[in-house]
Every structure is written in C-alpha cells, then in structure tokens.
Image: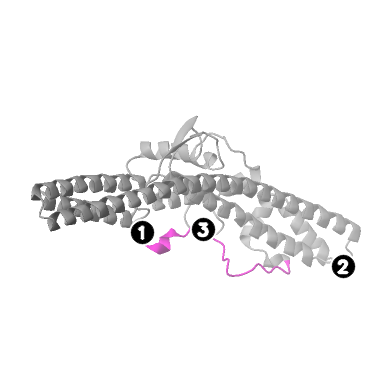
Amino acid sequence: MGQLATRFYQSLLLMTLLLGAAGPTVARENPKDFTLPSTLDYSKAPSVKSFSDLSPSALHVASLLNIDNDLRDLDSQAKSADRDRLNLLILKQNLTEAILSQSFEIRATIGKVDTEIADADDLQALLEERRDKALRLNSIANFVSGGITGIVGGSLNLGDVNAKVDDSMELGDGIVQAGLALYALKQQSGEKHTVKGLPNMLGRLLSDKPNAEYSPVIWKFINEVPTGQIDTQTRRDILLAHWRKLGLIDRSRRDMASEKERAKVIAGMTTQARVSIDLLDARSAMLHDLKATVSELDSYLLELIQYLRSVKI
C-alpha cells in the first residue's frame, strides 16, 4: 500500500511540474507575430529641412490639426522674394503654438495611461507576492512532511517494527503530499482580488461607450487607417487584432460572450470585479500598446516642428 501511495504522489507531482513549466498559452503564432504592427521606422530619426521632406503621414496629421493650408502658405511665403517678414513671423508662431499644444495633449494622454499601468502593476505585484509566499510555505510543508515521514519510516524498518505501521505512514505521507501538490497547482495562478470598477483608457477601445475621454485629434488618429497602408484596418482594429492574436482579451478563446465579459473587467467597466494576476498582466500589456500607438503622433509632430525650424524669417 505504501509503495502504491508513493507512486501516485510521484505521478501527481510530475504532472504538477509539467503543467507549471508549460504555463498558460498566450499565443499560438510565431514570435515575430508578437510585435505590434507599426508604420514607423524607429531605426531612423526624422530629418526635415524643407517642406518636400515632410512625410505623407506628417502632412495628414497637419490636416487633422487644420494647419495644412497654413503650412503651405508659410512655405510659399518663405520662398517669395518680396515676403512680409512680420506676417511670416506671426504665421510661424501660430503654427508652432498649434503643434506644441497638440504635443502637450499627447503628453497628458500618455500620462493617464502611465498612471493606469502603474496601478495595474502595483496590484499585480501584490498578488504575485501573496502567491509566491503561499508556494514557499507549500514547499516547506512538502519538504518537512516527506522528510519526517521518510526518517520515521526508515527507523521503523531498522527496528524491525510491524510493516503495516510503515505502510500506513507512507500512505498518509502520500495523501498529504498529494494534497500539497494540488494546492501548489491551484496557487500558481494566484489569488483573485475584488476591486471597484474604475474605467480606464482602454474602455473606449473595447466598447462604444465613451467612458474615457480622448482629445478629438488623438481619437480620430486612433480610428484612422495609417497613411500608405494597403488594407483598410484602422489603428484601433490593428490593436484589437493584435490583442486577440496574443490571447489578451480572451485567454481561453472560447466564444465572443466570454471575450466581452473579460474585456469589461480589463477596461474597468463593471461595478465590482475579481481581478487576477493574468488579467492585470493583460491590462498592463494592452495599455502599453495603446501608449505606443498614441506616441506615434509625436513622431509626426516632430517632423512638423523640424520644418518650422528650417524656415528662416
């Protein structure tokens, strides 16, 4: 009986280790597909010395700011021999203020996203510490249980005590260690924490309800097809497709209903919700992707500022 219990415990422990090593399946695609698609080439710094150097994306952002006509007017006046320097200075100053104002709006939006990332990371770190503490206690109990039982069982064999006592101890040891192994398996995902639903910046992307405010230019930028892209996917569509590919919105990939329910919790659109380490990790990753998408605007504004600096009064 003791040997049977030991074999059962060993098989269960092996299964626990294998499941723990495998972890949750995040994606089924190649590693190269994990990168968020972008139309920007971050390996090259923008270098604009004339109006013709502006990229189509930068010109499109200028149209979003309603300054595209003023930019062309500035370029035309700067090339004119009889230009009005005072009028040119005023035009350049107004364009600079419009671009800097939009840049500060981007900074404010990114600041909100950074705050929400920090909140998710802090709560995730708390739950991870509690999980690790439970696993450490489990490991200590497992070690003490197996060690003491082995020592006592061995001493009984040396003393030629009835073998039934030794078998009973091994059976009890197998039951205890099997229970500890199951408890460790349960603790790997960590505990769930009930939090008050606070809408975050993901809410408007995951739902049509405007529970998170964006500036008109930023929201329009997110919902537009990137300039020069062949397909008709907007930046919002690209984000949602990327999150589904990684399994962030629905880890189990069951159905649309479960995806919507998980999306509500991630976006903080429920009154109260039980969040886990896995869900907080997904929320943080999605906020990072949103931040990267909004930050693209800064690259195009940089091109516009570089052009203004190139204009000599």
Task: Give the x, y percent position of residue 304.
Answer: 71, 60
Q: Could you tell me the amino acid type at mark 3? A: Gln
- In terms of secondary structure, what is the magenta stretch mainly? loop
- Visible residue check, residue 130: yes
Instruction: Label 1: state its secondary structure.
Output: loop
Q: Which residue is mark 2?
A: 81
56 versus 223 height, above or below: below
In the image, is residue 165 above or below residue 33? above
Q: Mark number for residue 29?
A: 1
- The numbered mark, 2 or 3, whose residue comes first in the sequence reads 2
Q: How far, Cα to Cα, is label 1 from label 3?
A: 23 Å
Instruction: Give the extent of the magenta segment.
Output: 29-50
Residue at the spot of label 3: 229
Residue beneath the point at 74% across and 53% down: 100
- Nearer to us of marks 2 and 3 is 3
> Does residue 105 appear left or right of residue 199 in this picture?
right
Q: Is residue 248 visible?
A: no
Decide: few, some or many residues near mark 1? Use Cα within 10 Å; few <14, some 14-19, many ≥20: few
From the viewer's perspective, tell me whether residue 255 is left or right of residue 177: right
SS at mark 2 in the image: loop
Most extreme residue toward the front is: 159
Q: Is residue 45 magenta?
A: yes
Q: Residues within 10 Å of mark 3 (few under 14, many from 20)?
A: few
